[in-house]
Each structure stands twice: as C-alpha cells, then as structure tokens.
Image (tube, rainbow, N blue to C red):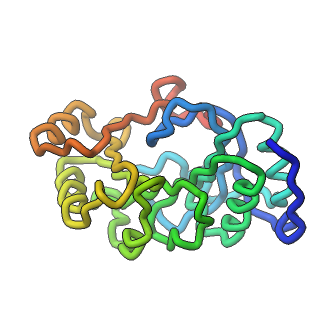
Amino acid sequence: MSEVTIPSSSAIKVRIHEIYCSVQGESTWAGLPCVFVRLSRCNLRCRWCDTTYSFTGGEMQSIAAILERVRGYGVPLVEITGGEPLVQKACIPLAQALVDAGYTVLIETSGSLPINTLPDAVHRIMDLKCPDSDMCKHNDWSNIEHLRADRDEVKFVLASRKDYEWSRDTIRQYNLTGRCKAVLFSPVFGDVDPKDIVDWMLEDGLHDVRFQLQMHKFIWPPDERGV
C-alpha cells in the first residue's frame, strides 16, 4: 500500500496481542487473504470464547509500527479484532490510519460498546450476544440505529436451540436483514450441530440470513493461534 505520513496519530500506542496474515474465516469476506491485527483486552467474558489468551498481555506498539508490520504483508484487506478492540480508545485512530493508508478495514466487535465512533469507511462486523454466551445483558441496542445497509454485518454465535430462537426473534423485531449488508449465524464449535441450525433456518424461512462456519477451524486445528 502507499506510504502515508500521519503526524497526528503515528506516535499513539495500542496494546497489540498479535499481527499475522491468513485467510478471513468468517463473514461475507470469508476466504480472502487478510491481515489480522489483534488488540489485547476485552470487557466481556463469553462462555464459549476462543481467544481468552488475548485478555491479558500484549505489547504497546505505535500506530506507525503497526502500519509498517501490516504493509510488510502486501495484502489490501485488514481486520482489527480482539478481545474487544473498542475497549482501547486508540483503536479509533488506528482504524483511521489504516483507512488513510488505503486498506479495506474490517472490525470485529462484540456490540457492547458504541460502533458509531469508528471511521465511516470501516466495515463493522458486530456480534449480538445470545443468551448462552452469558453476556446478553451487555448488548448495546442503540448500535442497531447506526448499522449501514451497504457495509455492516451482524453476527449471532449460537450454542443451542434457545440461542437460535432468540436470534430469529431479534432479527424480526429489529428488521436486521433490512438494516445491514448481511446477518450471519455461526455455531459455537463443538456445542451445536451445524446441520440443526441449517434445518431450523429453512423451517422458519430465514432466507435472508447467511449460515457460516469458522473456516479457519477446518483448515487448521481448532485451537491453533495465528491463523
């Protein structure tokens, strides 16, 4: 990507857990090469979380250093993830710096913190936490008003039939398929049979909802990091 000077933000530091290049495993961007910038820390403790290692540790890195690392991979798609990246206020200038450098920028966020603080160019992939996550009470429902039909996506991670029915009813209540680019159902790996979710979707006529699997967990061992 192009060399960009960002005097106002290049020295700002972000706590980074890891930066690596792989293929995007989820969302409508699945299958594309992508650089992942994983920020440390999270304000939630979902029962099924597969990145608990990012809750602690990490290294403070300047935005300039992060851009240099990302640039080295030569890949135009970048995802900011966590943990919960929006826990760190420096996530916002980091996202803007990546946009300014010419990258297509995605962010994975839990939906528990305001998403309208992000630069307009960022593609927001927002979870709504289902009951079995034990974090449902932390959903910031005001975020729904800020979803954009041309680029934002909403994801439901399902661990049970109860989660599925809650998600189905939430989609209908808030007309989510009309508010964003895609609505995604993703099974908790090992907790629920993916075939059951597909059957429920077809029975209920959820023709505008996209089913997905975490692609990276089928390419590599499910607990492997940096992929």
Left or right of 47? Residue 18 is right
At horizontal 18% and vertical 48% (from top left) the residue drawn is 161
Q: Position of residue 149 (x, y in %)?
A: 40, 57
Q: Residue furthest left?
A: 203
Residue 2 in view: yes
Of residue 224 and residue 115, the one placed in the foreground of this image is 115
Q: Which is more toward the observer, 150 or 62?
A: 150
Q: Which quadrant is home to the C terminus?
A: top right
Q: Is residue 173 above or below residue 125?
A: below
Comparing 154 with 190, the one in front is 154
Quarter of the figure with the N terminus: top right
**Residue 84 falls in image quadrant:** bottom right
Note whether residue 47 is visible.
no
The residue under the point 77% across, 35% down is 73
Q: Is residue 221 above or below residue 164?
A: above
Give residue 191's position: percent from left, percent from top.
30, 40
Percent x, y of residue 16: 73, 55
Residue reaching furthest to the top: 219
38 vs 94, nearest the viewer: 94
Residue drawn where x is 70% and y is 47% of the image? 103
Residue 170 placement: quadrant: bottom left
Q: Position of residue 7 (x, y in %)?
A: 89, 67
- Labels in figure, total: 0
